[in-house]
Image: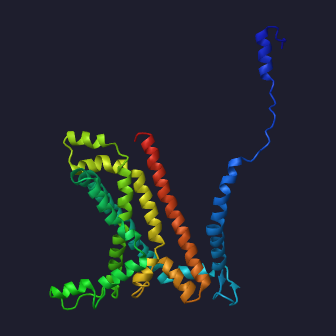
């Protein structure tokens, strides 16, 4: 092959020679230090307790100074044959209905009415006052709410049964003491406690919606329902996913309202996984078994959260692609 004689040929020959670039030595970014407090907090509050919980679930132990015996996966095998364990997860579906589906739907309508109707016709102060009243059950301590609803639903002296007796009902139901009415009563209380959260989130989301969209729709003759479907719902879709995710996690690990109202009864009709874990862990002194229930519940919550997050990412991707 003849040697290049022109300047262009010389440049081509130089381009063919591989250029060795000096290796960059890896240097830790100074910003990593900012993650250190969060990492320590995560390890102390979540990581270490979760690992210990898994470790305890592999043992048969009554707690305290009692002997601890390694049994491997025996607790998990027993869970698969435990009818109350499966019943508690079936009841979690009712918790999701009461804490996610119904409050989210009602919160959507309430937020749209307060923002698009009450705020325009009665002023923003009226809308803000009503929003605060809807949120009031959220800031009440669960113990206070439990005492209130125990009084309202008491079979002997409760306000509901007093009204029913006044209307001529001879034997009104025992709302929290009957297996047939306990779960609907608990669901009613949870809906009352939960409605304020999505309402506040959705009203905050509506603040960033361009008012010209609503004005243009009104000029085109669109009624409230058409504006709700065409403008409100698409504009607050990210907040809807956030509310669905946080409320679903809260529903799966609900504990305090069950503890205050029914303690899982009667006849396990309101038993949920977190309370069943507490029951085995403390009341029955079956620490390993209670830890196994808590571990399974944690895995279920993580999987459900990942699925909802996946749907949110797919929805955002479709919007970016204009579909």
Q: Residue at x 64, y 64 (%)?
A: 41
Name the quadrant containing residue 251.
bottom left
Q: Is residue 283 visible?
A: yes
- The quadrant of the picture occupied by the C terminus is top left
Q: Residue at x 23, y 88 (%)?
A: 172
Q: Is residue 151 above or below residue 248?
A: below
Name the spot of residue 113 as percent of width and height, x first: 26, 56
Name the spot of residue 110 as percent of width and height, x first: 29, 59
Name the spot of residue 317 as percent of width and height, x first: 47, 45
Q: Is residue 314 above or below residue 15?
A: below
Name the quadrant containing residue 154.
bottom left
Q: Is residue 309 left or right of residue 99?
A: right
Q: Is residue 105 visible?
A: no
Q: Residue at x 29, y 40 (%)?
A: 212
Q: Is residue 294 left or right of residue 87?
A: right
- The quadrant of the picture occupied by the N terminus is top right
Name the quadrant containing residue 259.
bottom left
Name the spot of residue 297 as percent of width and height, x first: 53, 72
Q: Residue furthest front?
A: 125
Q: Residue at x 42, y 82 (%)?
A: 260
């Amino acid at each position: 092959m003849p040697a290049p004689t022109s300047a262009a040929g010389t440049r081509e020959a130089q381009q063919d020679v591989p250029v060795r670039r000096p290796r960059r030595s890896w240097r830790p970014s100074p910003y990593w230090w900012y993650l250190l407090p969060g990492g320590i907090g995560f390890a102390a509050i979540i990581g270490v307790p979760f690992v210990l919980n898994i470790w305890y679930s592999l043992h048969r132990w009554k707690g305290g100074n009692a002997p601890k015996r390694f049994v491997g996966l025996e607790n998990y095998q027993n869970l698969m044959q435990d009818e109350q364990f499966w019943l508690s997860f079936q009841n979690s579906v009712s918790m999701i209905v009461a804490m996610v589906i119904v409050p989210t739907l009602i919160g959507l309508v309430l937020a749209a009415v307060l923002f698009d109707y009450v705020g325009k016709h009665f002023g923003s102060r009226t809308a803000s006052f009503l929003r605060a009243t809807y949120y009031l059950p959220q800031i009440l301590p669960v113990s206070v709410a439990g005492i209130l609803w125990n009084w309202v639903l008491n079979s002997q002296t409760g306000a509901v049964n007093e009204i029913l007796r006044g209307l001529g009902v001879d034997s009104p139901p025992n709302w929290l003491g009957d297996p047939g009415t306990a779960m609907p009563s608990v669901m009613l209380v949870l809906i009352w406690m939960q409605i304020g959260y999505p309402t506040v989130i959705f009203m905050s989301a509506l603040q960033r919606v361009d008012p010209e969209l609503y004005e243009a729709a009104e000029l085109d003759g669109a009624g409230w329902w058409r504006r709700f479907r065409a403008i409100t719902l698409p504009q607050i879709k990210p907040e809807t996913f956030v509310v669905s995710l946080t409320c679903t996690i809260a529903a799966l690990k609900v504990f305090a309202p069950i503890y205050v109202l029914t303690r899982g009864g009667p006849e396990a009709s309101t038993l949920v996984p977190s309370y069943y874990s507490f029951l085995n862990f403390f009341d029955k002194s079956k620490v390993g078994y209670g830890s196994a229930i808590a571990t399974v519940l944690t895995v279920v919550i993580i999987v459900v959260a990942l699925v909802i997050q996946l749907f949110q990412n797919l929805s955002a991707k479709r919007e970016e692609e204009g579909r």
